[in-house]
Amino acid sequence: MSRQDEPLTPAAIWFAAGQSIAGHTGERRCPQCTDEGCPQLAWALDQRAGGKAVSVVPILLLAARP
């Protein structure tokens, strides 16, 4: 997901979380995936488990740190 199309509404964030979860099914990985886990997937699972919509940007920024 690029910064330009980051979802801003709660419904769009909920949908994006579902897409992230679906994108990690099977052996598929995303650019944020590491051997220790995936912050994008963790964010998506937290969205769906917690039932609240928050931005993914802070999580992606943490993952981008050296």
Image: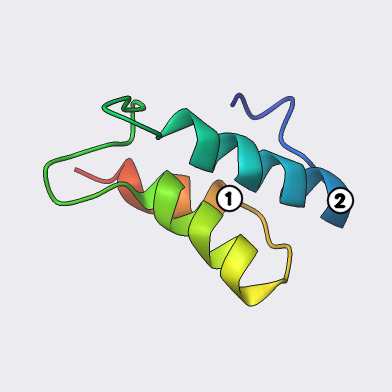
Residues at discs 1 and 2 in contact (Cβ within 8 Å): no
Task: Identify the residue shown where x is 84% and y is 56%.
Answer: 10
Q: Secondary structure at mark 2?
A: helix
Q: Which mark is residue 1?
A: none
Task: Identify the residue shown where x is 42% and y is 48%.
Answer: 41
Quadrant location, the C terminus: top left
Horizontally, is 39 left or right of 66 in the view?
A: right
Circle 1: is it few (<14), some (14-19), or many (20+) Cα within 10 Å? many
Residue 30 position, x and y percent, is 36, 27
Task: Identify the residue shown where x is 74% and y is 51%.
Answer: 14
Residue 11 position, x and y percent, is 86, 50
Residue 9 visible in this rendered orientation of the protein = no
Q: Amino acid at mark 1?
A: Val
List the residue tagged with mark 1.
56
Q: Secondary structure at mark 1?
A: loop
Quadrant location, the N terminus: top right
Q: Which residue appears farthest toward the left when viewing the image?
A: 35
Horizontally, is 28 left or right of 19 in the view?
A: left
Residue 42 position, x and y percent, is 41, 57
Q: Amino acid at mark 2?
A: Ala
Task: Identify the residue shown where x is 27% and y is 36%.
Answer: 33
Mark nearest the camera among 1 and 2 is: 2
Circle 2: is it few (<14), some (14-19), or many (20+) Cα within 10 Å? few
Horizontally, is 29 left or right of 45 in the view?
A: left
List the residue tagged with mark 2.
11
| Count of labels in the image | 2
| Occupied quadrant, residue 5 | top right
